[in-house]
Protein backbone atom coordinates (compact mmCIF):
# COMPACT_ATOMS: atom_id res chain seq x y z
CA UNK A 1 0.00 0.00 0.00
CA UNK A 2 1.40 3.37 -0.94
CA UNK A 3 1.37 6.54 1.11
CA UNK A 4 -1.01 8.10 -1.39
CA UNK A 5 -3.53 5.27 -0.97
CA UNK A 6 -3.31 5.39 2.81
CA UNK A 7 -3.70 9.16 2.88
CA UNK A 8 -6.69 9.02 0.54
CA UNK A 9 -8.38 6.33 2.64
CA UNK A 10 -7.78 8.30 5.85
CA UNK A 11 -9.05 11.49 4.27
CA UNK A 12 -12.20 9.68 3.18
CA UNK A 13 -12.89 8.55 6.75
CA UNK A 14 -12.11 11.91 8.37
CA UNK A 15 -15.24 13.73 7.12
CA UNK A 16 -17.38 10.91 8.59
CA UNK A 17 -15.55 11.19 11.91
CA UNK A 18 -15.95 14.97 11.86
CA UNK A 19 -19.68 14.72 11.14
CA UNK A 20 -20.18 12.22 13.98
CA UNK A 21 -18.22 14.36 16.44
CA UNK A 22 -20.15 17.52 15.58
CA UNK A 23 -23.51 15.70 15.58
CA UNK A 24 -22.87 14.26 19.05
CA UNK A 25 -23.58 17.54 20.85
CA UNK A 26 -26.89 17.98 19.03
CA UNK A 27 -28.02 14.39 19.66
CA UNK A 28 -27.05 14.47 23.35
CA UNK A 29 -28.81 17.81 23.73
CA UNK A 30 -31.93 16.42 22.04
CA UNK A 31 -32.02 13.44 24.41
CA UNK A 32 -31.58 15.83 27.33
CA UNK A 33 -34.60 17.77 26.13
CA UNK A 34 -36.59 14.54 25.76
CA UNK A 35 -35.74 13.50 29.31
CA UNK A 36 -36.76 16.84 30.86
CA UNK A 37 -39.36 18.56 28.68
CA UNK A 38 -40.88 20.67 31.47
CA UNK A 39 -37.48 21.94 32.62
CA UNK A 40 -36.47 22.74 29.05
CA UNK A 41 -39.69 24.65 28.41
CA UNK A 42 -39.20 26.51 31.70
CA UNK A 43 -35.70 27.53 30.62
CA UNK A 44 -37.02 28.69 27.24
CA UNK A 45 -39.70 30.76 28.99
CA UNK A 46 -37.13 32.20 31.43
CA UNK A 47 -35.27 33.95 28.61
CA UNK A 48 -38.50 35.53 27.42
CA UNK A 49 -39.21 33.50 24.30
CA UNK A 50 -42.91 33.19 23.49
CA UNK A 51 -44.55 29.80 22.98
CA UNK A 52 -42.18 27.61 25.04
CA UNK A 53 -43.82 24.38 23.86
CA UNK A 54 -43.47 25.32 20.20
CA UNK A 55 -39.87 26.46 20.75
CA UNK A 56 -39.13 23.21 22.58
CA UNK A 57 -40.57 21.08 19.77
CA UNK A 58 -38.71 23.11 17.14
CA UNK A 59 -35.38 22.81 18.95
CA UNK A 60 -35.95 19.09 19.47
CA UNK A 61 -36.73 18.54 15.78
CA UNK A 62 -33.69 20.54 14.67
CA UNK A 63 -31.26 18.87 17.07
CA UNK A 64 -32.52 15.31 16.64
CA UNK A 65 -33.32 15.49 12.93
CA UNK A 66 -30.29 17.57 12.00
CA UNK A 67 -27.97 15.46 14.15
CA UNK A 68 -29.16 12.21 12.55
CA UNK A 69 -28.94 13.69 9.05
CA UNK A 70 -25.39 14.80 9.80
CA UNK A 71 -24.32 11.36 11.05
CA UNK A 72 -25.86 9.60 8.05
CA UNK A 73 -24.59 12.18 5.59
CA UNK A 74 -28.11 12.70 4.23
CA UNK A 75 -28.83 16.14 2.75
CA UNK A 76 -25.70 17.05 4.67
CA UNK A 77 -25.18 20.56 3.39
CA UNK A 78 -28.78 21.56 4.16
CA UNK A 79 -28.66 19.93 7.61
CA UNK A 80 -25.32 21.59 8.37
CA UNK A 81 -26.58 25.00 7.32
CA UNK A 82 -29.70 24.61 9.46
CA UNK A 83 -27.66 23.50 12.47
CA UNK A 84 -25.19 26.38 11.97
CA UNK A 85 -28.01 28.95 11.95
CA UNK A 86 -29.59 27.23 14.98
CA UNK A 87 -26.24 27.35 16.83
CA UNK A 88 -25.76 31.06 16.17
CA UNK A 89 -29.33 31.90 17.20
CA UNK A 90 -28.95 29.77 20.35
CA UNK A 91 -25.70 31.56 21.19
CA UNK A 92 -27.31 34.98 20.85
CA UNK A 93 -30.57 34.14 22.65
CA UNK A 94 -29.33 31.89 25.47
CA UNK A 95 -25.66 32.78 26.00
CA UNK A 96 -25.47 36.56 25.47
CA UNK A 97 -24.35 37.36 29.05
CA UNK A 98 -20.70 37.53 28.03
CA UNK A 99 -19.67 39.03 31.37
CA UNK A 100 -20.30 35.58 32.87
CA UNK A 101 -17.30 33.43 31.90
CA UNK A 102 -19.42 30.26 31.69
CA UNK A 103 -21.90 31.94 29.32
CA UNK A 104 -19.04 33.36 27.25
CA UNK A 105 -17.62 29.83 26.80
CA UNK A 106 -21.05 28.52 25.75
CA UNK A 107 -21.41 31.44 23.33
CA UNK A 108 -17.99 30.75 21.80
CA UNK A 109 -18.70 26.99 21.68
CA UNK A 110 -21.85 27.62 19.66
CA UNK A 111 -20.04 29.99 17.30
CA UNK A 112 -17.21 27.44 16.84
CA UNK A 113 -19.76 24.70 16.11
CA UNK A 114 -21.33 26.94 13.48
CA UNK A 115 -17.88 27.41 11.94
CA UNK A 116 -17.33 23.66 11.71
CA UNK A 117 -20.78 23.17 10.23
CA UNK A 118 -20.10 25.84 7.61
CA UNK A 119 -16.99 23.86 6.62
CA UNK A 120 -19.29 20.90 5.93
CA UNK A 121 -21.62 23.17 3.93
CA UNK A 122 -18.62 24.29 1.87
CA UNK A 123 -16.72 21.03 1.38
CA UNK A 124 -19.50 18.43 1.56
CA UNK A 125 -20.05 15.25 3.55
CA UNK A 126 -17.19 13.12 2.22
CA UNK A 127 -17.17 9.66 0.68
CA UNK A 128 -18.87 7.80 3.53
CA UNK A 129 -22.29 9.44 3.33
CA UNK A 130 -25.71 8.79 1.87
CA UNK A 131 -25.26 11.96 -0.21
CA UNK A 132 -22.12 10.56 -1.82
CA UNK A 133 -23.84 7.26 -2.51
CA UNK A 134 -26.96 8.99 -3.87
CA UNK A 135 -24.95 11.22 -6.21
CA UNK A 136 -22.88 8.26 -7.46
CA UNK A 137 -25.97 6.23 -8.44
CA UNK A 138 -27.31 6.98 -11.92
CA UNK A 139 -30.86 8.28 -11.81
CA UNK A 140 -33.62 6.10 -13.23
CA UNK A 141 -36.62 8.03 -14.47
CA UNK A 142 -36.87 11.45 -12.90
CA UNK A 143 -36.25 12.86 -9.45
CA UNK A 144 -38.67 14.94 -7.46
Image: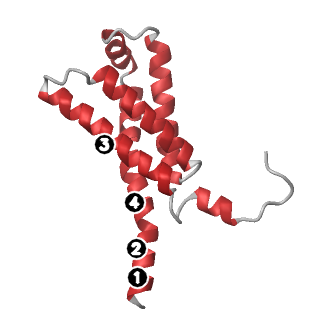
Q: Label 1: how many residues lie within 10 Å, few (<14), some (14-19) or many (20+)?
A: few
Q: CA distance from mark 2 to mark 3?
A: 24 Å
Q: CA distance from mark 1 to mark 3?
A: 30 Å
Q: Which mark is residue 6?
A: 1
Asked if residue 73 is positioned above or below residue 100 in the image, the reply reads below
Locate residue 93: give its quadrant: top left
Residue to which mark 4 is pinned: 17
For label 3, the SS is helix
For label 1, the SS is helix
| Horizontal side, residue 142 vs residue 50: left or right | right
* Residue at the image point whose x is 45% and y is 84% from the top: 5
| Horizontal side, residue 76 vs residue 98: left or right | right
Which of pointers 4 and 1 lies earlier in the amino acid sequence? 1
Q: Position of residue 71 (x, y in %)?
A: 48, 51
Residue lying farthest to the front in this orientation: 122
Residue to which mark 2 is pinned: 10
Amino acid sequence: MTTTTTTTQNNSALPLLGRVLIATIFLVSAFGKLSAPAATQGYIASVGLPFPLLSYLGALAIELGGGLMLVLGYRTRLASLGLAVFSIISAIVFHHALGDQNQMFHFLKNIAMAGGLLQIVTFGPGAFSLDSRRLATPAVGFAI
